[in-house]
Image: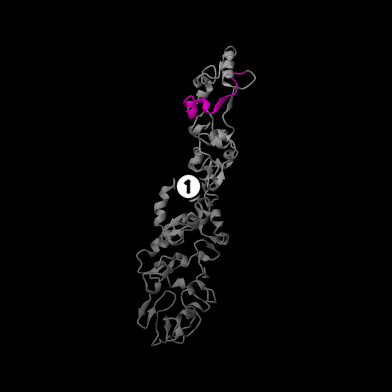
Amino acid sequence: MIPWLFVLLSIIAVGAGTSVHAADTTCRTAECHARVGGTENFHEPVKEGDCSACHKPINPVHPLKGGKSFALTAKDEALCYQCHDRLGKKKVVHPPIKDGECAFCHKPHGGANRFLLGVGSDQSELCFNCHDGSPFTRKYRHGPVAVGACTKCHDPHEASQKALLKGAVWETCLKCHVDFLKPLKEATFIHAPVKNGPCTACHNPHSSQVAKLLNKKTPDLCLGCHKSMEKKLKAKLVHKPLVQEGGCTSCHAVHFSKNKKLLSSDGVGLCLGCHGSDNLGKPPLKNIRKEIAGKKYLHGPIAKGECQACHDPHGNDRFRLLRGNYPADIYVPYKENTYELCLSCHDRNMLRFQETSLYTKFRNGKKNLHYVHVVNAKGRTCRICHEPHASNGEKLINKTGFKFGDWDIPINLKLTPTGGSCSPGCHQPFRYDREKPQEYGAGIRDTN
C-alpha cells in the first residue's frame, strides 16, 4: 500500500477503531492487553514497550472486528532467531527446538519464572507435560528432581550428550558431588563402574525405591556384574552380612578404598568389627578379638591380616565357611582331602607316611607322631592340639587346653632341640626325640 493511501485510511478509521500507529505502550492498558503485563518476568521487548519487535500491522484499524490487524514479523522459530542465537546444531536436540516450537515451553510475553517459563521454580510441572512423571516420583528422589530443577543436569535446548545432559555423566555428577573427588584421588583401589563407567550403572539419576538411588537393592545390584557370587548366595552357609540390610556394602566400599577387594577397612580389623563381640549369633560365636589379643604366636593368615585365606567371606557348603574340607567333628581319621584346608599350606606328606625323616619334626626317631594322632581309627582333628587363630604356646599349641565338655584338656607340651614331651589329659606323659628314639614299652599302642 502506498504511504499516502495508508495515512488516508488511518484518518478514516478513527471513528471505527484505534489507529495502529498509536504508541506501543497503549497495547498494555486496562481496556486492551492488560494481562500481558500481569507476569513477573517480561520478555525484553514487552518490558521496553516495543511490541513492533515481534508484531507488524497488516490493517490500519485495530481492533478489527472479524479479522486481525497485526501479524508476526516472522514465522515459527524464525521469529525468535531475529534476536536469539540459532539453536539445533548439536548432536541431541530437544524436540520442541527441532520442531521450531519455542513457545511450547516459553511464554512470548512473560512468565512466572526466569526464561519466560510458564511455571515457578519447580520445572517438573512444565516437563511432565511431555515426560512421564512416574520414574521421577519414587520413594527416594535425587535432589534436583525433588525440587524440580531439571535443567541442573539437562540442557533444555540441545547438547552433545545423550538425554540432553550438560556434560558426560561423570562430569555432570561431580559438578555437585565435589566432596567425592579428594578421597577418590587418594584411593588405591577404585570400583570398575566408578573408574570406567557412568554413575548410572548403579544409581538411578532421578528416583528409586531403594536408598542411595540404587537401581536395585543389594546384593541383586552387585550380582549384575559379579555373577560368580550368585552360587555362593545359594550355598548351605551364607555369611550373614550378605543377607542383612546393607548386603555387600557391610564389608565393601562401593566407590573406592585403600584396601584390596574394596574392603572398607583392613582384613582382620573388618572381620573383628563383628567377630569381636561376645553375643554374635545364637549360640554366640567365639569372640576372636579376645582370642587373639596379646597372644605371643599368631597363625600365619591372622598375622598377615588375611582371614579370607581360610574362610570364605561370602558363602559355601562347609563348616565355618572354610575354604577347604575340614571336619566339624573332633574325631575324624585322615583320608585324602579330609583335611584339605590345613594341607593347602602345610605339607600333606606329613599325614601320608607312618615313618619319615623329612615331613615333620613331631616324630620319635622316624616314627611320624602326626600320623599316629590323626590317621589312626580315632583320628584327632588339628584343633584338639593347635589353636587355629592364636596362642601363647609354640606351634600354636593350646596352652589352656581344648574344651572337652566341662573340662579343658591340658597339653603340657615342652620342646627340646631334638624333640620334646607332652603330658596331656588324654594319655600318660610321653617324651619323643628325633635323634634318640624313646622306648614306650610293649603295652603302648599307636591308637592311644
Image-based side of 12 in relation to 293, left or right: right
Q: Quadrant of residue 395?
A: bottom left
Give how far across and how far down residue 348 sits, in percent: 49, 78
Amino acid type at circle 1 is Thr
Kindly tell me whether residue 275 is visible in this rendering: no
Q: Residue at the location (50% across, 20% down)?
A: 23
| Residue 438: % across, % down | 40, 86
Q: Residue at x 41, y 67 (%)?
A: 302
The x, y position of residue 71, in whole percent, is 59, 26
The residue lying toward the viewer, choosing from 395 and 38, is: 38
- Tell me the quadrant of the picture where the N terminus can be found: top right
Q: From the viewer's perspective, is residue 96 above or below residue 91?
A: above
Furthest residue toward right = 66
* Residue 247 within the magenta-colored segment of the rendering: no
The residue that disc 1 covers is 172
Kind of element beneath mark 1: helix
Give the magenta-colored segment's residue range: 41-64
Q: Is residue 56 magenta?
A: yes
